[in-house]
Image: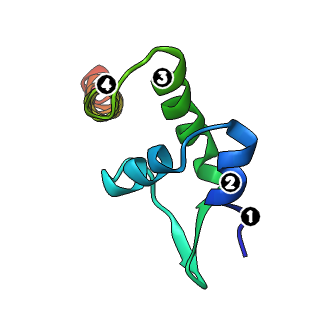
Amino acid sequence: MSERISREELVKIYNIEITFFDELVDSGLLKIQMENEIRYLMYEDLPSFERFANWHYDLEINLPGLEVIHDMLQKMEDLKQRNRELMNKLSAMSGEYEDI
């Protein structure tokens, strides 16, 4: 089983409000696992959680702002991936024409 941490442990370790964690989950910014009525965050999702917590507590960005920033960063990553794919296709096509 993958490593995970409970919501209660996160609240203690990161000194955040439990409602902030729940809002991240409710908005779809974090995915959790439930077991015996306990909410768990997978360790692989900790960097996202830490980023949201830093933006919220250090930069005072509210939940709608976090959603917008997350959406824009995801769109940027999608565009980067699409650009890589197009560049690879272009490179392959230019290689084909060099053989002619």
Marker disc for residue 22: none
First of labels 1, 2 by sequence position: 1
First of labels 1, 4 by sequence position: 1
Confirm whether residue 69 shows in the render: yes
Asked which secondary structure carries label 3, the reply is helix
* Residue type for callout 2: Tyr
Asked which secondary structure carries label 1, the reply is loop
Q: Is residue 97 left or right of residue 38?
A: left
Residue sitting at x 54%, y 76%: 34
Q: Is residue 40 left or right of residue 22?
A: right
Residue 86: where, in percent of width, then height?
26, 30
Inter-mark Cα distance, 1 to 4: 37 Å
* Residue type for callout 1: Glu
First of labels 1, 3 by sequence position: 1
First of labels 4, 3 by sequence position: 3
Pointer 1 with pointer 2, Cβ within 8 A: yes
In this figure, which residue is indicated by the disc labeled 2? 43
* Residue type for callout 4: Met
Inter-mark Cα distance, 1 to 3: 25 Å
Residue 30: where, in percent of width, then height?
45, 52
Q: Is residue 84 left or right of residue 1?
A: left
In this figure, which residue is indicated by the disc labeled 1? 3
* Residue type for callout 3: Trp
First of labels 4, 2 by sequence position: 2
Marker disc for residue 55: 3
Residue 85: where, in percent of width, then height?
32, 35
Foreground tag (4 vs 2) = 2
Relative vertical location of residue 50 with respect to residue 20 in this rendering, above or below:
above
- Decide: few, some or many residues near mark 2? Use Cα within 10 Å; few <14, some 14-19, many ≥20: few
In this figure, which residue is indicated by the disc labeled 4? 87
